[in-house]
Amino acid sequence: MDANATLRELLEDVPQVGRLEWIGLRPARREGVVVVQSATLVAGRGLEGDRYARKGGKRQVSLIQHEHLPVIDAFTERSVTPELLRRNLVVAGIPLAALRRLRFRIGEVELLGTDRCAPCSRMREALGPGGYAAMLDMGGILASVTRGGVIRVGDEVRALGFPEP
């Protein structure tokens, strides 16, 4: 380990390569999530067919870590599915928290991690008492789409580094 590595170098060092496990679209507020095998992402907007794509902004895409689902499940004593958590993408094999400030690629699409995705008050409704608390620091990340295209379940997820200044 390099004791002289800068914080930037440490944050940019994401050797893992992940996999897209699940895709969900939220067509409208309080409507059920539509599970799909592929989706089109539009630069500066988000996922076609998702309600947040109409707005753009920092909530263009929401991602959650596949490895966190069993933990949330254990805390809520409930069978947790991605649909209940209302995120767009479930990713495995790469630490999403590390991508929060980085550019990354899923298949042919490029994204920029913009923020943590905090749980909303609906998590208590979806997961029962304690559902909100169970998701603290496990809600995933938000990302903006910098290069659009099509993603598919099974696509590789790879860190690309910090954005150019």
Image (spheres, helix red, strand yellow):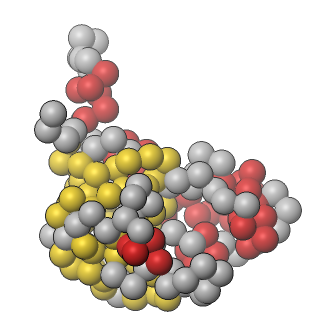
Near-viewer residue (5 or 127): 127
Quadrant in the picture for residue 157: bottom left
Which residue does the image show at 35% across and 76% down from the upper left?
47
Residue extending furthest front? 55
Q: Nearer the viewer, residue 119 or 10?
A: 119
Identified at 23% across, 49% down, the residue is 103
Q: Is residue 28 left or right of residue 2?
A: right
Residue under the point 75% across and 51% down: 133
On the image, the x and y values in percent for residue 100 come to 38, 45
- What is the tally of numbered marks visible in this picture? 0
Q: Position of residue 21 (x, y in %)?
A: 39, 73
**Identity of the residue drawn at 31% across and 21% down:** 7
Quadrant location of the N terminus in the rendered image: top left
Is residue 162 in view from this perspective? Answer: yes
Q: Please, is residue 50 above or below residue 158 in the view?
A: below
The front one of 53 and 130 is 53
